[in-house]
Image (cartoon, rainbow, N blue to C red):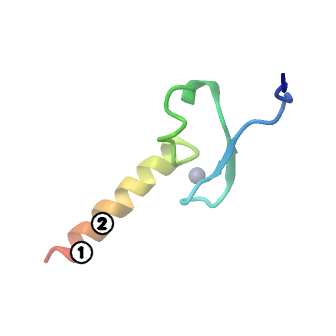
Amino acid sequence: MARMRKGQLPTKTCPICGRPFEWRKKWARDWERVIYCSERCQREARRRRVASTSAQSS
Ligand SMILES: [Zn+2]
């Protein structure tokens, strides 16, 4: 049976700050859906999306 190495956590790259971030325990259920490294970046992304949406819709 293959054993997972400690420290070999999955990683993703945050599209907002461009930094890679590692799996965290609090994302255990949601890792598939996690896109941003932090709440801050998530908020920033939402802000940008809202801004670009409202800019397009006029
Ligand atoms: Zn980020």
Q: Secondary structure at mark 1?
A: helix
Image quadrant in which you'd find residue 7: top right
Q: Position of residue 20 (x, y in %)?
A: 69, 52
> The N terminus lies in which quarter of the figure?
top right
Of residues 47 and 2, the one drawn nearer to the viewer in this rendering:
2
Residue pointed to by mark 1: 55
Residue at the spot 63% in from the left edge and 24% down from the top edge: 25
- Mark 2: amino acid: Ala
Residue sitting at the far left:
58
Classify 50 as above or below 4.
Answer: below
Is 32 left or right of 24, judged from the image as shown? left
Mark carried by residue 40: none
Disc 2 designates what residue? Answer: 51
Q: Residue at x 22, y 76 (%)?
A: 56
User: Callout 1, which amino acid?
Assistant: Ala
Question: Mark 2 touching mark 1, by CB under 8 A?
Answer: yes
